[in-house]
């Protein structure tokens, strides 16, 4: 599977409150509405610039802060198929895997605002088409790939009954 | 093995586990609150689940926006309440509820050696009693409610050895803010933080809770302290003996060891907008404040309130400052009344709220407006955390917060004596 899209770049330590502000997080059951407000506190017009299929790129420790799944759900509901960062905060990472959002660790210094990427999951490579360079993706453990392929941990458990580890 | 590795090995039926290994572990307790619980319940229902693996191991604590601040929050708590009635899981109603991470240990629901997951990032608090406890998402909580299991990657461990004598007005909050300041907000990413050393061995339980509570602010999977005499007396000596073997082996492998001389640590204050912006309180000059919050899962326990009261006794909160005190649970609230702390707070001009997370996450009961500044005993000072995106939160211990309430600007408790 190859995903193609433009990127929106952010820095280090992007926390879950920046991804979806605390002002909206009590509307927990309306993810479509939450999606309209992503990144609002650090970029008020962000949602207007976003097209379905675009990727988010961050630095290190992306998704730090609260455990609220609203952060990954809002990204997914905004039509973002994948987030690429140098590293992810651990609860955000679990949440992404568990709901089937693709989270990739790679050297994001090689990606600039507005670049267009091809993400080749099978071969573990990001092709930066704007810069014409290949960036390796840190290998994803099989257990995560299997959960993502089933569309998240609930579907996975429904199918297999346990985690098959 | 380290204590963390031992607990995880115990819960996946293996003799030994190593960092990086994936395990399927049995959970002893699953926690969710009024923000994360409704999504977990929605997932639970989506899969068509009909029963909980073990209802007594599920706890629903509506603490974030309660007493319900508006119609939406009331609807969310209703989802928890109805689910709890239907499936017979534990639910804490107003009048019994408190801030989850102060409430559960108080209720005896968290024990040394357990594996606890909670759909709240500060679930790592229970490491203070020698449990492996970690924050997860709502879907994890739903999966665990159904199956009793969670997938985990064994973390490597950083050992922090604290030695030396604590300075006056320095406690668990200062040790953890200082430590996060040294290693950064991702300094323990995916890892376990094991707090040990002679200073920890004499550190009171409430301070231990504060330290483990903020392990997540360094990105850690868990924070943990080996159970000892202080732990046993916390449980009023009701623990059984085999728990005494819950210690890291002398040949346990650590990713690294950091030794910290606490006699060099002064009260710490973390400036906006990261907990890692920790500096000595003395480095803050002329930082005027509008609000003080003393409470939260980090510092809303009885000893925290006592420390604040010692500073506030016989003094007045500055006329330019609003000082909000929030005891973390009903029991703490009652003890604070019985010990006369409420008289001190009321006479000095503080307002006292019911147990709630409230202002910590900008929910209610003390939200900041544009341009306003607070000093707070809470755990996060991200942009917009306590209110407007143009507001500012400084993190500190209860004595520094109380002293600052009197002076009207950030100050060392010595200054108002």
Image (tube, helix red, strand yellow):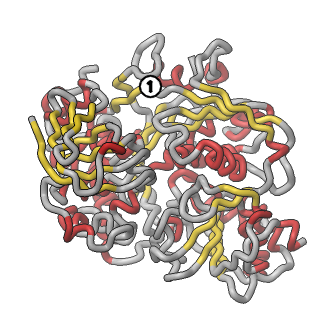
- The answer to which of B258 and B319 lies nearer the viewer is B258
Residue A91: image location, x then y, percent: 39, 43
Left or right position of A7 against B210: left
Write the residue at 53% across / 20% down. B6
**Which residue is the extreme one toward the front?**
A132
Residue occupying image coordinates x 54% and y 32%: B192
In the rendered image, the quadrant that contains the N terminus of chain B is top right
Between residue A16 and residue A24, name the one nearer to us.
Answer: A16
The answer to whether residue A59 is seen in the rendering is: yes
Q: Residue A110 placed where, x, y %? A: 32, 43
Q: Secondary structure at mark 1?
A: loop
- Is residue A154 shown to the viewer in this render? no
**In this view of the protein, which residue sits in the foreground, B155 or B84?**
B155
Give the residue pinned by disc 1: B154
Q: Label 1 lies in what chain? A: B
The residue at the point 74 percent across, 68 percent down is B284
Q: Counting other residues with Cα less than 10 Å from the Cα at mark 1, is it few (<14), some (14-19), or many (20 or more)?
A: many
- At a point 86% along the width and 78% down the height, the residue shown is B314
**Which quadrant is home to the C terminus of chain B?**
bottom right
- As drawn, the residue found furthest toward the left would be A1
Where, by quadrant of the figure, is residue B200 drawn?
top right
Left or right? Give the position of B99 relative to B288. left
What is the x, y in percent for residue A96? Answer: 28, 44
């Amino acid at each position: 599977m190859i995903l193609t899209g433009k990127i929106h770049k952010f820095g280090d330590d992007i926390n879950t409150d920046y991804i979806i502000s605390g002002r909206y997080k009590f509307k927990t059951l309306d993810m479509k509405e939450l999606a309209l407000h992503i990144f609002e506190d650090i970029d008020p017009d962000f949602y207007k610039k976003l097209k379905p299929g675009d990727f988010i790129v961050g630095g290190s420790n992306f998704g730090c802060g609260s455990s609220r799944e609203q952060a990954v759900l809002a990204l997914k509901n905004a039509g973002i198929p994948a987030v690429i960062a140098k590293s992810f905060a651990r609860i955000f990472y679990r949440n992404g895997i568990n709901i089937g959002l693709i989270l990739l660790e790679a050297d994001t210094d090689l990606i600039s605002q507005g670049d267009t990427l091809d993400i080749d999951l099978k071969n573990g490579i990001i092709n930066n088409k704007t810069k014409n360079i290949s960036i390796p993706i840190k290998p994803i453990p099989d257990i995560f790939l299997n959960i993502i392929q089933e569309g998240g941990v609930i579907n996975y458990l429904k199918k297999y009954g346990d985690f098959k580890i | 093995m380290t204590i963390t590795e031992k607990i995880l090995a115990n819960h996946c039926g293996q003799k030994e586990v190593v960092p990086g290994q994936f395990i399927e572990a049995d959970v002893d307790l699953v926690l969710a609150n009024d923000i994360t619980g409704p999504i977990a319940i929605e997932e639970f229902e989506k899969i068509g689940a009909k029963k909980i693996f073990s209802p007594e191991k599920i706890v629903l604590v509506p603490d974030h926006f309660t007493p319900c601040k508006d119609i939406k929050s009331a609807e969310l708590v209703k989802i928890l309440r109805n689910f709890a009635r239907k499936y017979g899981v534990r639910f804490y109603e107003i009048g019994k509820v408190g801030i989850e991470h102060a409430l559960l240990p108080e209720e005896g629901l968290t024990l040394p050696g357990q594996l606890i997951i909670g759909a709240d990032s500060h679930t790592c608090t229970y490491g203070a009693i020698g449990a492996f406890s970690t924050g997860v998402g709502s879907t994890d909580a739903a999966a665990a409610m159904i199956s009793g299991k969670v997938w985990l990657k064994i973390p490597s461990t950083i050992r922090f050895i604290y030695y030396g004598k604590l300075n006056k007005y320095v406690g668990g909050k200062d040790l953890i803010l200082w430590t996060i300041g040294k290693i950064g907000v991702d300094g323990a990413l995916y890892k376990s933080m094991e707090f040990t050393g002679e200073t920890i061995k004499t550190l009171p339980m409430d301070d231990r809770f504060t330290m483990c509570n903020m392990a997540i602010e360094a990105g850690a999977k868990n924070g943990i302290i080996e159970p000892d005499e202080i732990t046993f007396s916390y449980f009023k000596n009701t623990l059984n003996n085999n728990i005494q073997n819950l210690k890291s082996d002398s040949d346990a492998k650590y990713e690294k060891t950091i030794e910290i001389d606490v006699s060099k640590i002064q009260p710490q204050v973390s400036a906006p907008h990261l907990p890692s912006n920790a500096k000595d309180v003395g480095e803050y000059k002329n930082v005027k404040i509008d609000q003080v919050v003393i409470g939260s899962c980090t510092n809303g326990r009885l000893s925290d309130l006592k420390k604040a009261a010692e500073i506030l006794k016989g003094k007045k909160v500055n006329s330019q400052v609003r000082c909000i005190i929030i005891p973390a649970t009903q029991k703490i609230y009652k003890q604070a009344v019985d010990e006369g702390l409420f008289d001190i707070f009321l006479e000095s001009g503080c307002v006292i709220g019911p147990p709630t997370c409230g202002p910590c996450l900008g929910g209610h009961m003390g939200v900041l407006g544009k341009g306003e500044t607070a000093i707070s005993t809470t755990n996060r000072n991200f942009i917009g955390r306590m209110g407007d995106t143009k507001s500012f939160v400084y993190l500190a211990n209860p004595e520094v917060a109380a002293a600052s309430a009197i002076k009207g600007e950030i100050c060392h408790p010595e200054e108002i004596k």
